[in-house]
Image: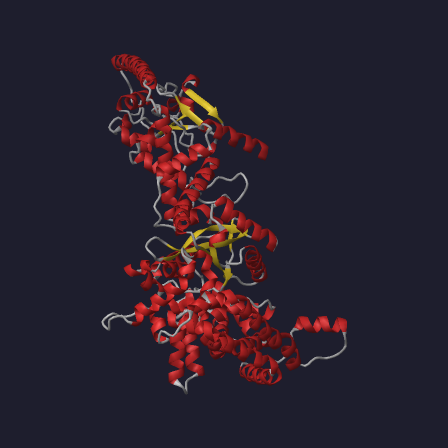
Amino acid sequence: MPNFCAAPNCTRKSTQSDLAFFRFPRDPTRCKLWVENCRRADLEGKTSDQLNKHYRLCAKHFEASMICKSSPYRTVLKDSAVPTIFDLTSHLNNPHSRHRKRIKELTEEELRKIKERRLEASCEQVETNKENEISERQEGGESVEDAPPMTPEEKEIRDYLKSLFEIIVVIGKQNIPLNGHAEHEEGSESFTPSNFQALLEYRINAGDEVLRKRFEMAAVNVEYCPALQQRRMLEVCESCIREELLQEIRECRFFSLVTDHAVEIGGEDHLPLFLRFVDQTNCLREEFIGFLPCEGDDEALADRLLTEITEKWGLNMEYCRGQAHVSSGVFVCKMKSVATRLMEKYPMAVYTPCSTCALNIFLANSLPFTSVQVVMSTLKKIDSFFSKSALARAELEHAISIFHQNNEAKANELKEVCRTSWTERHDTFELAVDLLESLLLCMDSIHFNEDLKWNDRITSEAYVISETLADFEFVVTLVVLKYALSFTRAFGKNLQGQTLDVYFAANSLTAVLHSLNEVMDNIEVYHEFWFEEAINLAAAMEIPVKVPRLYLRKQRAETSLEIQPESYFKEFLSVPVVGRVIQELKDVFSENHLKALKCLSLVPFVMGHLKFNTSEENNADIYKNDLPNPDTLPAELHCWRIKWKHRGKEFSLPSTIYDTLQLSEVKFFPNVYSFLKVLCTLPVLNLENSKYGVARKRLKAYLADTPVSHRSRSLALLNINYDVKHDLDFMVDTYTKMYPEKEEDLYKIKSAETVNGH
């Protein structure tokens, strides 16, 4: 909003030039002088607070000696400044003009009294300034033996910085962008000031004396806090909030690293980073630590990750006990290479799947085949499409009713599934095959839009999805994924189940790999069955069976031989998918990983289910160096089994690691206690209390609610870690140590940047 000058016969506004505008002072005496000099009769009945909030005078009404212009970006008035330059007669040349600003006619006596009051106020101001100077010098002369007290100027700056940091923390936690509306063309004016500037003005008007004193005589149409200072303060806020979390992790020593799908921030891809650890209350937590730029090759990314964790965050990677990387598309191979490099350097940082992602989804995302990635990206589009519109979901349910009108139970089951996040389940591919015909009918109906109830955006999205669903390569890929990953469905579900289920899953991997190897040995038979189902499904959807167009183009350029669709999809889809799934399982369930999971038999409930006939000693060597007394581990494990075997019947066995760690007597078994704390940091294990995994939900909400152009790494950290305590004094101390220069230097830097930019 522009600022209009309150002086009579002045039509200037702040958006027309770089001319500075100033608020009326809040001091009643000085404010009265300003009103008298303005000769605005309609302003005499207003309070100094009202005038300060709503009225401005431009710099043209002040003597040049009253204005201090320390830089092109900071214009302030002297404390004793009074406006004296006014045009009180030009309106007389146009008697028909309408005056919004009524000029008060003064008698000679009133003019004389005004001059006397100005002189008295000026003398009082000079005396006050002298007294303040003497007082400050006296205070500065008082010295404390150990730590000299802050000067009034230093205290003022410190209070000012605290106010700025408080505003930044509020902006970050409430997810308010720092800037206002973006400028669309070079040189064009933005519609509103920045949000940061607006909040500063709001606090000044609400009575923040620290800010009022600093900016009262400043031009109201200049930037109070330069962009450079804002960036620096954001960085300090980010580092201080992160340090609160990192301090806890350092005290707990052991942690695991988890990354999520890359997101766009500032025009670049970034990896969200989480750290898992067991805190001082023995609760497993997963906290968001920040974003990592992921440009460059895998080697550069691995080096950057290690530098961030060790040098910037001060963590010791020797204490990292697990890593999980949720990715898709082009980032799959890169993140696998990063995981391999980290394990080469730190063998105990075991590579595992992530408990927040179904194993079958994780495996499918890890398959570096174009047709598979098309299926995965299309499932995401479908989920997004229906999550945004209840009307679209109703259309899908109508399509389901049409296709399953003879089987009401099946129709109701599929409708119920569609009301959930079915694209993230363990049986996603089975559900996708069952829903495929209904999905295509629904998308075609929305695209045709015969009832004109869909807007152009929705019909366009529906058309793109329907074109993908109606491609035979998509159909056959979906069927192959359904069957190839059916062997890992129960295994993956157990991994995300109760502790006992996870233990049995670790012992069943051999059987899963055996089944997949059998499929590979008999791929001809299996593929024939899979391909037949794909053909039948395609026929029902009126989709022609054909080899992909890009392959045909390449084949014509190389050979004249013709390949049949069944042979093509066996060679380029079924065989590679099954082979890659086998290899992926071996990679993420390494020997160390399986040893660790088998040690879940230390949990009393698992131990009891196995009739206390367990032998943890065979696998416990994986964390032997992390134990306080490894030499006594065998004897301690024996006593641990005896304790639970001969418990009282009224005492139920703890069924999770968390329940076990909460027992007071567990600390009498220091090796078992330490072992369980390290074990449960593995990313493959579920967070037993959902409130300690809220960081991931907040990240998802932040990305969904924030346009790409408004995303900020620093503000995101503040928003996602909403509950993390913050210390404004610590932020101020950190800022003054990192950037000891005075505020005027900021404006010089900014001025130089502006000149160089032009």
Q: How many marks?
A: 0
Q: Residue at x 34, y 50 (%)?
A: 723
112 shown above or below 380: above
Would residue 283 appear left or right of 375 to someone viewing this image?
Answer: left
564 shown above or below 460: below
Q: Quadrant of the C terminus?
A: top right
Q: Is residue 216 visible?
A: no
Occupied quadrant, residue 526: bottom right
Q: Nearer the viewer, residue 69 or 638?
A: 638
Would residue 105 appear left or right of 89 to someone viewing this image?
Answer: left
Image location (x, y in percent) of residue 514 = 54, 79
614 shown above or below 621: below
Image location (x, y in percent) of residue 250 = 42, 48
Q: Quadrant of the N terminus?
A: top left
Occupied quadrant, residue 46: top left
Q: Residue at x 41, y 25 (%)?
A: 76
Would residue 182 appear left or right of 4 to someone viewing this image?
Answer: right
Q: Tell which residue pokes out farthest to the left in this image.
A: 650
571 shown above or below 29: below
Occupied quadrant, residue 569: bottom right
Q: Residue at x 46, y 68 (%)?
A: 618
Q: Tell which residue pokes out farthest to the bottom in this image.
A: 406
- Its colouring scheme is secondary structure
Image location (x, y in percent) of residue 743 = 44, 29
Would residue 739 appear left or right of 635 to someone viewing this image?
Answer: right
